[in-house]
Amino acid sequence: MRVAINGAGIAGTALAYWLGRMGHEVVLVERAPQLRTGGYVLNLWGVGYDAMEKMGLLPKLLELQYETDELRMVDRHGRTRGGYPSKVLQSLANGRIATLARADIAAAIYGLLDDRVETIFGDSIVTIDDDGTHARVGFEHAPQREVDLVIGADGLHSKIRQITFGPDSLFEYPMGCHVASFEVAGYRPRDENLYVAHSAPGRYVARFPVRDDKTLFFMLLRDEYLTGTLPVTESERKAAIVTAFSDMGWECPGILSQLETTDGIYFDSISQIRMDGWAKGRVVLAGDAAACPSLIAGEGAGLALAEAYVLAGEIHGHGADLDSALEHYERRIKPYAARKQRYAESMVPSFVPKTELGIGVRDLATLLMRLPGFPRLLMGRYFRDAMELPEYAMPCPEAQTPPNNSFVPTPLRGAA
Ligand SMILES: Cc1cc2nc3c(=O)[nH]c(=O)nc-3n(C[C@H](O)[C@H](O)[C@H](O)COP(=O)(O)OP(=O)(O)OC[C@H]3O[C@@H](n4cnc5c(N)ncnc54)[C@H](O)[C@@H]3O)c2cc1C
């Protein structure tokens, strides 16, 4: 088949990998001028971890992961008021969990692609003329071409979804919060292997040390702390952050003063994508484009990797019968994705509590995580994957026995 994939993020690179290995002719289209770098750090466990293993990427993943010893919640004076050692998460995930930069995951998979996959950077699919058996795709810049399948792996605000299924407003379920994330070089204080967070009603700020003496900041705010519409330009984003966080204690004044030194701020609504179906004619969606569970689920990357594997596996298994392949892909993944979404929805109140009392209760719960039995009671559901990846006989020369897993705990998950 000739396959066009829009978006070279996590789902897009993974699909390009699997479909390329199967001998299909793949063109991967990415709007950014190169593979996106920087950005936030996330946790990978469960089906996502398994999918990386199936690509033979566990050694790379363990090399790229960040070590974390502790997740700590502090008050406005920097005094500890909650948190737990990261090893409790490691044990909940049976040692199969890693803290990684999102960009590192995509780059690791991209590094496995060979010349069977063509990549077009700085472009996007903008039109699809689908006759039910083939699709003629038009690009912003490149000339049109005909393909057998178009895959939308272009994230939360997917262009392919907009073209094929309708505007975001039909499928986007905002969860009442926004997220901002950015990196600062040389920020002090710096605590190696420590994820430290401070909350005020409706807001949350955390810092985490990353490579090259950079610190990653991660901020959450309830919608009532965002004045006006979603900030789009860099200066609008900085202004929105300053307005929302300027009355907070802890290190917030220092963090806000560093905003001037940074660019590439990520700022978006925390939303889910809920759809009845992910396929129409010769178009199918994967990753956040299809079923974003939101960062509160903590498993969007894992879901994207699982979806890529299952979609490729079903295409492999069904041969020329693409309709059946797409139907089986949806049937296998949708219930699992829906469960993750329901869970994320239930976690919003503890993720960003509205009151001091709520923050106190949440922080107390994190202290209980230090006691035997409590991690499973409080967060067991978060780590339980009610799905195992099916076995498909897809060619994967990279797959090998995983090395001893020295694993890493995860900051962001603790934020829940
Ligand atoms: C702050 C934060 C923390 C998170 N924490 C976790 C976590 O702990 N665990 C976890 O599993 N997940 C986490 N997630 C979610 C996770 O990052 C996403 O679910 C995952 O990246 C989805 O992968 P994707 O390939 O669908 O989309 P993305 O990784 O977003 O990739 C989409 C790609 O498409 C490109 N693109 C967009 N529009 C176009 C266009 N028109 N044309 C061409 N290309 C386009 C983009 O540039 C991008 O490269 C977090 C997300 C955020 C924001």
Image (cartoon, rainbow, N blue to C red):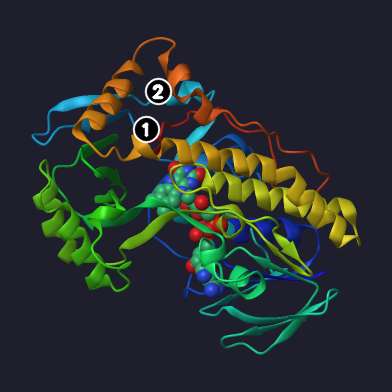
Q: Answer above or below: position of 211 versus 232.
A: above
Q: CA distance from mark 1 to mark 2?
A: 11 Å
Residue 217 tag number: none
Crowd band around label 2 with a 10 angstrom C-alpha radius: few (<14), some (14–19), many (20+): some
Residue bearing the label numbered 1 = 414
**Does residue 124 show up?**
yes
**Amino acid type assigned to the residue bearing label 2 in the image:** Lys
Q: Answer above or below: position of 399 versus 279.
A: above
Q: Residue at x 46, y 56 (%)?
A: 103
Q: Is residue 141 left or right of residue 15?
A: left
Q: Quadrant of the N terminus?
A: bottom right
Q: Is residue 349 left or right of residue 140?
A: left
Q: Answer above or below: position of 322 versus 353.
A: below
Residue bearing the label numbered 2 = 87
**Amino acid type assigned to the residue bearing label 1 in the image:** Gly
Element under label 2? helix
Residue 295 screen position, x and y as percent: 44, 47
Say which quarter of the image contains residue 50. Answer: top right
Q: Residue at x 19, y 33 (%)?
A: 356
Q: How many marks?
A: 2
Q: Residue at x 62, y 33 (%)?
A: 402
Residue 90 screen position, x and y as percent: 46, 25
Q: Is residue 344 left or right of residue 209?
A: right
Q: Residue at x 65, y 39 (%)?
A: 336
